[in-house]
């Protein structure tokens, strides 16, 4: 099945509004030649930078994402963000359950699931992050960890919901370390994720779900990674923080 490549830049806690605006102003020109039918190009700035970026990317082929969403419509949830607030800014994608949220902010499969459901109900496309820690991989627990994260994070979702869900596989040991998974190892794991999705939702659904790789992906390794059968793009941290490195990565990822 043909799945459209999706390259998303997760800016994490980087870029003021002015810096974010400057980045996308430069990026727009550098990726203007990328046909929207060929790839989805997404930037996910921090909340305070979204409005400025939304304005700057109007009329371009760059789409907007956020880095989190709360499950309640409003209320006493200090530090959180609601669906309406993101909708108003033109956000389309929402990253949910990033390993940094799980590691440092107590995110669990249960809260991931609540956020995913809220995102879908509001019409967003969730990018659901899963991935194992180094000691889990070394002790042979990778598949068990990923299975549990998929089962918990996607619990209760329908086949129709899955048409709007993107999975990001990010081995935690590869994030920001420069230690990319080899294309073979990444593909083996993506294939396991695909099989699990096929089991959970049926092959006709599972084969259509886009699975991004994340973890030290850069222009130099993007082509080989995305060439793998079950790798449909990337969730990019460090290399998304500069317009030229992100644009080069996008071009290499979709190069024939
Ligand atoms: O969300 C992005 C990932 O955590 C990857 O980050 P990185 O490209 O800096 O390794």
Image (tube, rainbow, N blue to C red):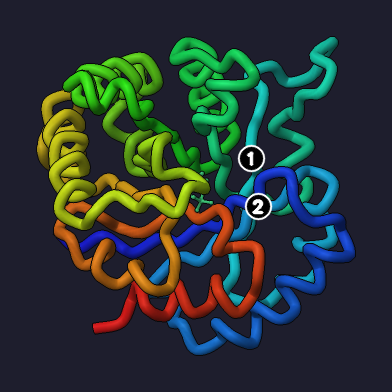
Could you say whether the residue bearing mark 1 is in a helix, strand or loop?
Answer: loop
Residue 168, image x, y percentages: 39, 42
The reply, left or right, for residue 137 in relation to residue 177 is: left
Number of labels in the image equals: 2
At x 38%, y 31%, the residue is 130
Q: Quadrant of residue 81?
A: top right
Rendered view: 67 above or below 136: below
Instruction: Look at the numbered discs 1 and 2 and tell me whether their residues touch, using CB distance below 8 Å.
Output: yes
Q: Nearer the viewer, residue 191 or 32?
A: 191
In terms of sequence position, does the residue under pointer 1 or pointer 2 come before the other? 2
Residue that protrudes farthest toward the right in the picture: 18
Could you say whether the residue bearing mark 2 is in a helix, strand or loop?
Answer: loop
Q: Nearer the viewer, residue 165 or 219?
A: 219
In the drawing, what numbered circle is on residue 227? none
Q: Quadrant of residue 147?
A: top left
At x 45%, y 73%, the residue is 250
At x 35%, y 50%, the residue is 213
Residue 246, image x, y percentages: 55, 71
Dot 2 alpha-carbon crowd within 10 angstroms: few under 14, some 14 to 19, many 20 or more: many
Residue 124, image x, y percentages: 55, 41
Pick the quarter of the image with the C terminus.
bottom left
Q: In the image, which is nearer the foreground, mark 1 or mark 2?
A: 2
At x 81%, y 23%, the residue is 79
Mark 2 sits on what residue?
11
The reply, left or right, for residue 238 in relation to residue 187 is: right
> CB of residue at label 2: within 8 Å of ligand 1?
no
Rendered view: 108 above or below 117: above
The reply, left or right, for residue 110 in relation to residue 227 is: right
Rendered view: 85 above or below 6: above
Residue 233, image x, y percentages: 35, 59
In the drawing, what numbered circle is on residue 67? 1
Pick the quarter of the image with the N terminus.
bottom left
């Amino acid at each position: 099945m043909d799945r459209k490549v999706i390259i998303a830049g997760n800016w994490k806690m980087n870029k003021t509004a002015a810096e974010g605006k400057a980045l996308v102003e430069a990026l727009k020109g550098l990726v203007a030649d990328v046909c929207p039918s060929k790839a989805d190009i997404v930037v996910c700035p921090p909340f305070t930078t979204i409005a400025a970026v939304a304005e700057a990317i109007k009329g371009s082929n760059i789409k907007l994402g956020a880095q989190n969403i709360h499950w309640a419509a409003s209320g006493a949830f200090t530090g959180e963000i609601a669906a309406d607030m993101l909708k108003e800014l033109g956000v389309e994608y929402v990253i949910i359950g990033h390993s940094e949220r799980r590691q440092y902010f107590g995110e669990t499969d249960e809260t991931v699931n609540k956020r995913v459901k809220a995102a879908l109900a509001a019409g967003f496309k969730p990018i659901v992050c899963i991935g194992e820690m180094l000691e889990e991989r070394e002790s042979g627990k990778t598949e068990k960890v990923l299975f549990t994260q998929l089962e918990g994070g996607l619990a209760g979702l329908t086949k129709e919901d899955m048409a709007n869900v993107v999975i990001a596989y990010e081995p935690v040991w590869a994030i920001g370390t420069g230690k990319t998974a080899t294309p073979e190892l990444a593909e083996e794991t993506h294939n396991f994720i695909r099989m699990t999705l096929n089991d959970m939702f049926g092959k006709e659904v599972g084969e259509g779900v886009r699975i991004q790789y994340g973890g030290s992906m850069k222009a130099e390794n993007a082509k080989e990674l995305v060439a793998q059968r079950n790798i449909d793009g990337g969730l990019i941290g460090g290399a998304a923080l500069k317009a030229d490195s992100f644009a080069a990565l996008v071009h290499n990822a979709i190069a024939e």
